[in-house]
Amino acid sequence: MAVTYEEIMSDLKRRIYKPVYFLTGEEPYYIDLIVNYIEDNVLNESEKAFNQIIVYGDDTSISAIIDTAKRFPMMSSHQVVIVKEAQTLKKLDELLIYLEKPLVSTILVFCYKYKTIDKRTKLYKVLGTNSAFLESPRLRDYQTPAWIERYLMTKGIKTDPSASAMLTEYLGTDLHKIVNELDKLIMMLPKGKPVVTSALIEQNIGISKDYNNFELQKAVGDKDILKANMIVNYFADNPKDNPIVLTITSLFTHFSKILTYHYLPDKSKNNVAAALKTNPYFVKDYEMAARKYNIAKTVQSIALLRTYDMRSKGFGDAGTDQGELLKELVYKILHL
């Protein structure tokens, strides 16, 4: 059975150690936090010289790792063996022998990043019962704004919902990248006003609070022709910073949620937020968009987005400038 990052860290801070930690998943952020903590805190500096060993998957084998893990610590209660880039190891099933009876004085840590163990295998089942087994999946787009808000909340900082949405749009779901930018923002916060706003992001990260995919979604949803055209013209003038494929994907997601909204029998705020996997703060935007785009217009918009996505990739188009394609697409959606 997999354990959570919080459970592992709670035990580590209380110096409750497991003989084997197997840390796996497409999101390396939590894996790195745990490994760094073990590397820095389990042994003191004098103990590390003889009892902390770091190897890499490309440079070792399971049999060599097991031989190392079976050694007893020197002048210490534990030895720490950390296997980085463990996803490159061959014959991983050979680990089953050691997992049957691991040495309690060894803390063996596997960093198996960017992929997961096949859940159909015996190794997966044994790891789930005989190790501290962490699965760290990559965040979905819709989960990221809430993650950003929670991260800042733990530091006593509030976040405007529009600010967390902007950051998600710009930074994606890479937690290392997100945390790096958030920590920069925290340093820039005015004293006595711990709130991350769209204006602060624009000043310190370089994302325009007025010209981004999030604002385009809202302008198109509101059928605000002037604002939508201003944003599209800005995108056309700055194509490298605003690739059409990301804009079309953003609008496609938006209209897919509008279509879902139309078919919800319960349109209460909390139910809509749960169904659309969005912050309740933004429910009003979908209510407005649904009034502007009935079911037929929403479906037509999705069809247009599919067509222009293909055209932007060279299918059925003789090479129209991508900025012009985007202007044409948004014009057609606004005038449905």
Image (cartoon, rainbow, N blue to C red):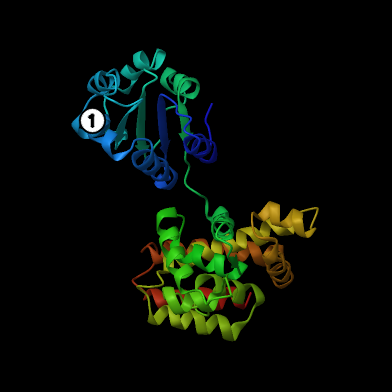
Which of the image's four quarters has the N terminus? top right
Q: Quadrant of residue 323?
A: bottom left
- The residue located at (47%, 40%) in the rendering is 136
- The residue located at (43%, 17%) in the rendering is 122
- The percent position of residue 305, horizontal first and vertical second, equals 52, 64
- The residue located at (32%, 23%) in the rendering is 92
Q: Is 196 left or right of 54, judged from the image as shown? A: right
- The residue located at (36%, 17%) in the rendering is 103
Nearer to me, 34 or 77: 77
Structural crowding at the residue carrying mark 1, measured as other residues with C-alpha within 10 Å and reported as few (<14), some (14–19) or many (≥20): some
Image vertical order of residue 82 relative to residue 150, above or below: above
Q: Is 218 left or right of 203, judged from the image as shown? A: right
Which of the image's four quarters has the C terminus? bottom right
Nearer to me, 70 or 200: 70
Image vertical order of residue 331 relative to residue 312, above or below: below
Q: Is residue 59 visible?
A: yes
- The percent position of residue 130, horizontal first and vertical second, equals 46, 20
Q: Is 30 left or right of 199, judged from the image as shown? A: left
Q: Secondary structure at mark 1?
A: helix
Q: Is residue 263 visible?
A: no
- The percent position of residue 248, horizontal first and vertical second, equals 49, 65
Image vertical order of residue 131 relative to residue 7, above or below: above
Q: Amino acid at mark 1?
A: Phe
Q: Can you identify the residue that label 1 sits on?
A: 50
- The percent position of residue 274, horizontal first and vertical second, equals 70, 52
